[in-house]
Image: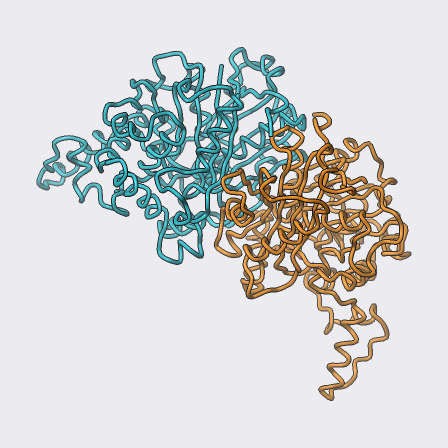
Chain colours: A orange, B cyan
């Protein structure tokens, strides 16, 4: 196992608007992301130069009754009869599709590859969505025992509370921070801060002539069980990511060819992947995922960078606890320093190392099969200084990271980017 | 797009028994195939030498309500926390997983990789299986119009009948030939020839005191609508592959490392993949798949071999017509010579170029996500002279091919093997 044979660059990146769209299916979402991606390529580029599609999708099978998405999306992109493959690793599906595309270019199989991720989740009722997502955990030994995803991450949250003194307020701080970032992202499903949500609820109550809620601030609002009920203790509504329709795409090529298409390619200098036991109860630790530690180590080693070199990262905050697990697994903070980092705003947009400038899964939304590629889209924009609105970080980003987890941690993929 | 950076060898190959097993789920099937694969490796090998898993599965999501199979199977193989990815391209899922694994070794990502394919299909009632398989076709523009897979392949069959004068008897000949081969394969689901099936029906009728059926021979039996009803004209029961539970695995490594594990590795010298329009009605031809033509051309070019060099092949006979489409798409026979080839036994076990010595999908069985790897298992055994029973071909196989189709042809992957 060594260094990859060829280096890879991103020359284009784009996503659909994330949200709940009753009038759009997977095809519409993919097409929207593809158009935005092609428009992001600076110089002359024709889709016929693309040689293959790598697509991530978790379970259009269960969400839409449609399998075999790769040739369907390849046809939409005008690629027929070129190769098109779908990768499924739960919520890490498109992060791993990205990795497979990088490996294919490195192997010499292709020079120019389209990577996509798509998920259409909102056609099912909430219980159907919960069941479909729970199919990414161990059906026999977890799901049939009554545990679905909020419960599995709740186990990790209480384990961290017990070991490191993390409080419920720490989880809330992550939600508040990611909503604040998402409020600045026009592609985000929830582009409102928690304060804005609170104020609109107050305004609604006043309009209806109801008693004015007595919330002092965002934290007070999140403590109110009527506004922020428990889903699985200690995870409450505002600790959970969203149910989302969306898609995202990237165009990759070799380091050598990249300059033909843009003066500012973003290089992917490290890729790593790992797995963890399928059932949470079989793991040696509940506040760390070996899949993520392995993926991170592999990516750091390939990139020749250290955690301290990472200036911004998109991490997999499917639940607020997951962002804390990521901070430790990636070595970005010592595990016993994470509570402090969250409390003091290390990870805020103006902090020492911003996490989830996009709003993260919490606020940007989490169309599970699209998430991994959408993370890379955010990094591409931030590194090129092209992030829309006020979420562009104020410093020059030379080195960044994406961290994409599947299921309760059974899969994880990490990528490292440089200019 | 060029030659791969490193060459790849198969050092071990095995499959589970194919069949309908109410007491086995995906985990059991994968474990059974894995054990047989590890036992096939000639010299000392430890599973801890495996660096990653590439798994093909069509839709455990719909068949078993279980997604995210890759880390589950990696854990069964003792690979946690190493990388594990699932590929889904309908019935070509594990053929493409094999291709991704080859590419990963070529890229330098890994030196030793486990490839697997698994499908557990028989838990659902027949209508559920038909619906689940139909999800690999175009749900919106085909399935909702009432067309499922037998109907889609029936369209190809009538197109071929119209263009090339293929008869219903030609389709029957393919079924008879593949059943004859499957009767010699202890891993096959249907290890009975059509003659054996006919005779056992005659014996049953006699035992029950019913009038003795008046079938002159196998062809006469297959013409009897009570024995061989139409599923979708001209495709009848004995033209359709089976609903099967099964799994298959391969262990791949580099050309250089292979000799450490066996004196008789089988090299994969060519790999190619293609796509076709999602809906059958959008295609320029109904008796050819551009996905297969593209995959074959890519594989031949990489391998530096011509169709005439291929001595045996496992081709994707999900329906008998599909074997005829494959014969033309792979360039193994001229399209207008295929009827003759089928009639004169070119493709029989003792013919000039045996096809589907395993029994094919028709008789060995078709656990859709396992089929692509199971085809490679058969080639591995045949090339090493290790095919069980009397189905070992009588000549030395220097060059062979596998052809694995997804859906109604939306995906296809071709591999070429040498000693």
**In the picture provided, is A228 more to the left or to the right than B90?**
right
Q: On the rendered image, what quadrant is the C terminus of chain A found in?
A: top right
Q: Quadrant of residue B146?
A: bottom left
Q: Nearer the viewer, residue B22 or A333?
A: A333
Q: Position of residue A179 (x, y in %)?
A: 77, 62
Most extreme residue toward the left is B211
Above or below residue A400? Residue B402 is above
Q: On the rendered image, what quadrant is the N terminus of chain A found in?
A: top right
Q: Position of residue A414 (x, y in %)?
A: 73, 41
**In the picture provided, is B114 more to the left or to the right than B169?**
right
Q: Nearer the viewer, residue B28 or A12?
A: A12
Above or below residue B73? Residue A198 is below
Q: Position of residue B369 (x, y in %)?
A: 47, 38
Most extreme residue toward the bottom is A209
**In the picture provided, is B94 more to the left or to the right than A310?**
left
Q: Nearer the viewer, residue A108 or B220?
A: A108
Q: How many marks?
A: 0
Q: Quadrant of residue B101?
A: top right
Above or below residue B308? Residue B72 is below
Q: Position of residue B396 (x, y in %)?
A: 40, 12
**In the picture provided, is B380 more to the left or to the right than B76?**
left
């Amino acid at each position: 196992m060594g260094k990859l044979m060829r280096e890879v660059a991103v020359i284009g990146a784009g996503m659909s608007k994330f949200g709940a769209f009753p009038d759009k299916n997977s095809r519409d979402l993919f097409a929207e992301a593809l158009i935005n991606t092609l428009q992001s390529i600076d110089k002359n580029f024709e889709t016929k130069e693309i040689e293959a599609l790598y697509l991530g999708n978790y379970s259009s099978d269960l969400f839409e009754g449609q399998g075999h998405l790769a040739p369907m999306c390849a046809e939409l992109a005008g690629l027929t009869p070129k190769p098109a493959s779908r990768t499924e690793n739960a919520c890490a599906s498109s992060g791993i599709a990205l990795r497979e595309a990088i490996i294919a270019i490195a192997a010499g199989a292709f020079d120019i590859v389209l990577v996509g991720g798509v998920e259409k989740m909102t056609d099912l009722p909430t219980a159907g969505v919960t069941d479909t997502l729970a199919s990414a955990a161990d059906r026999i030994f977890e799901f049939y025992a009554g545990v679905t995803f909020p419960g599995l991450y709740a186990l990790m949250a209480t384990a961290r509370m017990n070991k490191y003194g993390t409080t419920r307020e720490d989880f809330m701080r992550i939600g508040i921070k990611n909503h604040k970032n998402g409020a600045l992202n026009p592609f985000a499903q929830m582009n409102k801060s928690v304060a804005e949500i609170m104020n609109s609820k107050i305004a609604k109550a006043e309009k209806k002539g109801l008693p004015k809620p007595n919330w002092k601030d965002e934290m007070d609002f999140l403590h109110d069980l009527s506004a922020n009920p428990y889903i699985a203790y200690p995870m409450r509504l505002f600790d959970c990511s969203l149910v989302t329709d969306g898609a995202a795409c990237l165009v990759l090529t070799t380091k050598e060819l990249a300059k033909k298409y843009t003066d500012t390619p973003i290089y992917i200098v490290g890729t790593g992947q790992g797995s963890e036991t399928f059932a949470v109860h079989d793991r040696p630790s509940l506040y760390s995922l070996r899949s993520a530690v392995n993926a991170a180590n592999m990516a750091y080693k390939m990139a020749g960078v250290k955690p301290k070199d990472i200036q911004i990262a998109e991490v997999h905050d499917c639940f607020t606890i997951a962002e804390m697990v990521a901070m430790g697994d990636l070595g970005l903070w010592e595990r016993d320093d994470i509570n402090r980092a969250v409390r003091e705003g290390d990870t805020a947009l103006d902090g020492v190392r911003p996490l989830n400038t996009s709003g993260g899964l919490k606020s940007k939304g989490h169309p599970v099969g699209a998430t991994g590629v959408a993370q890379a889209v955010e990094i591409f924009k931030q590194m090129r200084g092209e992030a829309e609105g006020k979420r562009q970080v104020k410093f020059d980003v030379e080195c960044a990271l994406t961290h994409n987890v599947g299921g309760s941690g059974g899969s994880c993929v990490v990528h490292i980017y440089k200019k």
